[in-house]
Image: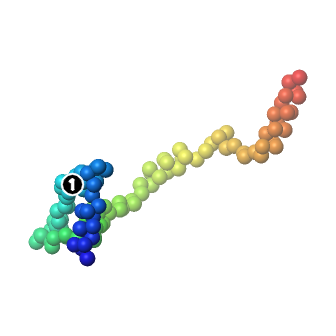
Amino acid sequence: MRNTSFAAYVSSLNRDDNSIRTAIKSMKIPQTSLPPIRKNSIPPGPWAKSDKEKVELFATHLSEVFTPHDNIQDPEVEREITTHTQPSEREITTHTQPSESLQAFLHSTQTQT
C-alpha cells in the first residue's frame, strides 16, 4: 500500500508546474528534533523523551520553583494604605441619570439669560 501510494505520488510530479522542485525542497529541510530533558536532581532523574513526559516534567519543575508568597501583613502598612485609599468627603460624588444632567444644564442656561 505504501509503495503504491509513493509510486502514484512520484508519477504525478511534473517538471512544468514546479512540483518536482517543491518535493525535493521539502526533503532538503532538516528535521530538528528536540533533545530529551532530565530532571536536575541527585541522583539525576530519568530522561523525558516524549512530549507528554516533557510537559509533565516541566509542570513539576514550575510547581517546585514558583511557590506563593506568605501573605504576612504589616499592620502599619495596611493602616497607611487604608487611609490613603479612602475618599475624602469632597471626593465622594453621586451618580446622576442623564435626565438629571439635562435638567441641570437647562436650569443653568435659563438662569444665565
Measuring 67% from the left and 39% from the top, which residue is drawn there?
A: 90
* Residue 85 percent across, percent down from the top left: 55, 46
Measuring 72% from the left and 45% from the top, which residue is drawn there?
A: 94
* Residue 108 percent across, percent down from the top left: 83, 30
Q: Residue beneath label 1, please?
A: 24
Viewer-proximal residue among 75 and 86? 86
Quadrant where the C terminus is found in the figure: top right
Viewer-proximal residue among 40 and 33? 33
Element type where label 1 sits in the image: helix
Quadrant where the N terminus is found in the figure: bottom left
Single out the residue that lies furthest toward the top. 113
* Residue 82 percent across, percent down from the top left: 53, 50
Q: How is the image coloured?
A: rainbow
Q: In which quarter of the image is residue 6?
A: bottom left
* Residue 48 percent across, percent down from the top left: 19, 70
Viewer-proximal residue among 29 and 54? 29
Measuring 78% from the left and 43% from the top, which residue is drawn there?
A: 98
Q: Report the side of 102 relative to 77 (left or right).
A: right
Is 16 situated above or below 109?
below
Q: In which quarter of the image is residue 9?
A: bottom left
Q: Report the side of 111 relative to 72 (left or right).
A: right
Single out the residue that lies furthest toward the left. 43
On the question of residue 101 being in view, the answer is yes
How many numbered tags mark residues here?
1
On the question of residue 57 being in view, the answer is no
Is 39 situated above or below 97?
below
Q: How crowded is mark 1: few (under 14 residues within 10 Å), some or many (20 or more)?
A: few
Viewer-proximal residue among 88 and 106? 106
Measuring 79% from the left and 39% from the top, which residue is drawn there?
A: 101
- Amino acid on which disc 1 is placed: Ile
Single out the residue that lies furthest toward the bottom. 1
Q: Report the side of 40 relative to 79 (left or right).
A: left
